[in-house]
Image (cartoon, rainbow, N blue to C red):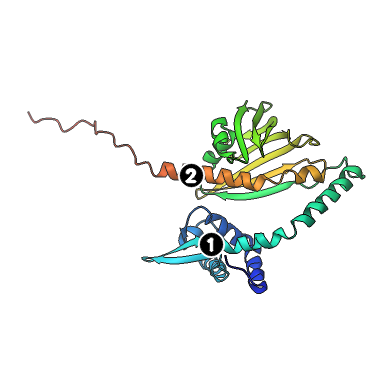
Amino acid sequence: MTVLNPKQLEAVFRAIADPTRREILGLLRYRQQTVGELAGNFRTSRPAISKHLGLLRRVGLVVTKNEGTARICQLNAEPLRMIDDWLRDYQEFWTQSLKSLKRYVEEGPMSTATVDAIVLEIAIQAPAARVFEALVDPAQRMKWWSQKGRFETTNVESDLRPGGRWLMSGIGMGRPFTVEGVYRTIEHPRVLAFTWLPSWDEEATETQVRFDLHEQNGVTTVRLTHSGFATEGSRARHQGWPQILDWLKAYAEGCQRAQASIPPVAFPDTSPGPSPRK
């Protein structure tokens, strides 16, 4: 395993500090792509994307190869693993700091106020309608909102209408869980909003979850907003959303690739032929 020296570590940090470069790494996470394919996901010019790729190559996060006239880009996650190892040294410090902050927020004068929302975005290479159906269809949600051995959804109930109730249950981290709520906004395929009340957070109050979907050129940007937390402690116990969005992305893009690989059905020509000469 490669060990990064301080200068290399700083270079990787600078590379991933840019949102466009982070998005490029996200696009390469599940499959290799050409420079042209990558550039098609952004409003900036292809030369600008090439410059970003050049920097990512220099720090070792992207490797390229030529296939004919195309340059293929592939993710190399090894430098990110080195950063993860470096960050682990501070895990104990963060854990203690969060516990202290939890006590202050929940016991101090801010205990009845709301705190900052969780806001995340992810780009999914699939139409908005497909992503929306994965969010609202109980059978599909059970397939992707899950990770074997960690968080397994075994039951989903959904009354898909404003004011209708929904519920998910299963096993999370070896313990039964339930999360439930009420649908507030359903605008297919652009907006889905509902309340959220989980069983794993004993101090939780009802919060709000909203998905905003925007499709452009076959790529859907999903913006998640989880708001209404009464305490920072409760917000801190909802840090699994990036993983959930990754599961959604993998599922929707997998469905899209599977559909694209199915050849069209050829129907026999039933149109009438030329009339016989008399």
Q: Quadrant of residue 23?
A: bottom right
In the image shown, does 140 or 83 lie closer to the viewer? Answer: 83
Q: Is residue 200 toward the left or the right of residue 28 in the image?
A: right
In terms of secondary structure, where does tag 2 sit?
helix
Residue 49 in the image: above or below residue 169: below
Residue 273 in the image: above or below residue 81: above
Q: Residue, x 86% and y 50% (percent of image)?
A: 100
Report whether residue 89 is seen: yes
Which disc, if any, is residue 76?
Answer: 1
Number of numbered discs: 2
Q: Quadrant of residue 144?
A: top right
The reply to whether discs 2 and 1 touch (Cβ–Cβ < 8 Å) is no
Q: Is residue 3 toward the left or the right of residue 72 in the image?
A: right
Q: Residue, x 56% and y 60% (percent of image)?
A: 77
Report whether residue 127 is seen: no
Which residue is the extreme one toward the right?
Answer: 109
Circle 2 packing at 10 Å, graded few (<14), some (14-19), many (20+), is some
- Percent x, y of residue 206: 77, 34
- Disc 1 residue type (three-letter): Asn
In the image shown, does 99 or 275 lie closer to the viewer? Answer: 99
- Percent x, y of residue 182: 70, 29
Label 2 to label 1, Cα distance in Å? 21 Å
Instruction: Point out the frontmost of discs 2 and 1.
Output: 1
The quarter of the rendered structure image containing the N terminus is bottom right
Residue 222 in the image: above or below residue 202: below
Q: Is residue 191 toward the left or the right of residue 235 in the image?
A: left
Q: Residue, x 59% and y 64% (percent of image)?
A: 79
- Percent x, y of residue 250: 53, 46
Which comes before the other along the chain, label 2 or label 1? Answer: 1
- Disc 2 residue type (three-letter): Gly
Residue of label 2: 254
In terms of secondary structure, where does tag 1 sit?
loop
